[in-house]
Every structure is written in structure tokens, then in C-alpha cells.
């Protein structure tokens, strides 16, 4: 039985004239917020506040950075500033003799955390299964690890 594979799944459907659903929602939201600003605030303040709102709505609807939608760029920006970071320091030649650990040994190597026995066993099992054509059971790896 043959199945038809969908083509062009990255392209969104145009629902509202030349706009996709997301583009329409971004533009309608920005226009609605601008309308609320104009009804509640004096015209001068409403113009000043509605310009960034309209610009953000247009950017969300049409602007792309490296072929990625602007909404994803903003999402990644917030994830980066809210999320944790891992800083790795590699010793340079200038700092080699300046600091030693409390035991008196110089820090010549980068510290790499060790895997627990169960995680190491699971990792070797996965590698064995991917590298060998015949499947082995998890119990067989206990003898080799």
C-alpha cells in the first residue's frame, strides 16, 4: 500500500488573504492594543506608546533573523537571560603557576565529573547496541562493565 507523503511542511497556510494565522494574530493584537491606548490615553502619549507596540507587532509578523521568526528570537533571548549558565575555565600559560589547590598540587587538568556506575553501564549498553549488529541484553553488560 502506498502512502502520500506531505510536501512543503515548513510553509504555513495563508488563511487571511496574504497572511498566515500567526501573522494575523500578531497584527490584530498590536492593532487592538493601539486602539485601547488611543481610547484611554491622551493622543500625544498614545502615539508615543503605540509606536513600539505597532513596531513589535510588525516585527513579530514579518521580520526574520537567519530565516527564523522573530518570535523565536525573543523566546531564546528570555530563555538565555532567565536560565542558568555553565562557565568552563581553561587555564592559560600566564596563570599556570599562580594558583594551586589546597593540597599543594597545581591545577594542570580540567576537572571532568565522573559518571555514576549505573549511568556508565547504561551508556556502554547503548553504545554496544548501536555498534553491534546482534542485539545483547542489559544483563550481559553487567559482566563486562
Image (cartoon, rainbow, N blue to C red):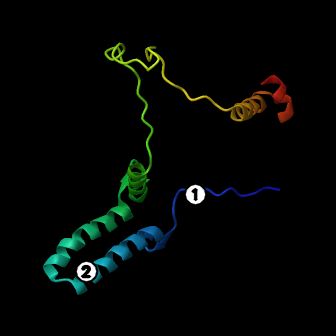
Whole-angstrom CA distance, mark 1 to mark 2, is: 38 Å
Few, some or many residues within 10 Å of mark 1 (<14, 14–19, 20+): few
The correct choice, above or below, for 83 with respect to 25 in the image is above
Instruction: Indicate the quadrant where residue 130 lies.
Output: top right
Name the one closer to the observer, 89 or 40: 89
Name the one closer to the observer, 138 or 34: 138
Q: Dividing the image into 4 quarters, which one contains the C terminus?
A: top right
Whole-percent x and y of residue 10?
54, 56
Q: Residue furthest bottom?
A: 39
User: Residue at (35%, 14%) from the top-left corner?
Assistant: 93
Residue 57 visible? The answer is: yes
Instruction: Indicate the quadrant where residue 28 lies.
Output: bottom left
Which residue matches tag 2?
A: 37
Camera-near label (1 vs 2) is: 2
Which residue matches tag 1?
A: 9
Whole-percent x and y of residue 103?
47, 17
The correct choice, above or below, for 98 with respect to 4 in the image is above
Q: Secondary structure at mark 2?
A: helix
Mark 1 or mark 2, which has the lower sequence index?
Answer: 1
Amino acid at each position: 500500500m502506498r502512502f502520500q507523503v506531505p510536501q512543503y511542511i515548513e510553509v504555513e497556510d495563508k488563511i487571511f488573504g496574504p497572511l498566515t494565522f500567526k501573522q494575523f494574530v500578531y497584527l490584530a493584537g498590536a492593532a487592538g492594543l493601539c486602539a485601547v491606548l488611543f481610547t484611554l490615553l491622551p493622543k500625544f502619549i498614545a502615539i508615543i506608546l503605540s509606536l513600539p507596540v505597532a513596531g513589535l507587532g510588525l516585527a513579530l509578523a514579518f521580520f526574520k533573523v537567519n530565516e527564523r521568526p522573530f518570535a523565536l528570537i525573543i523566546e531564546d533571548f528570555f530563555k538565555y537571560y532567565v536560565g542558568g549558565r555553565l562557565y568552563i575555565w581553561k587555564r592559560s600559560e600566564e596563570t599556570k603557576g599562580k594558583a594551586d589547590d589546597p593540597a599543594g598540587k597545581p591545577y594542570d587538568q580540567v576537572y571532568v565529573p565522573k559518571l555514576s556506575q549505573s549511568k556508565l553501564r547504561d551508556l556502554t549498553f547503548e553504545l554496544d547496541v548501536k555498534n553491534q549488529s546482534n542485539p545483547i541484553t542489559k544483563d550481559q553488560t553487567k559482566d563486562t562493565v
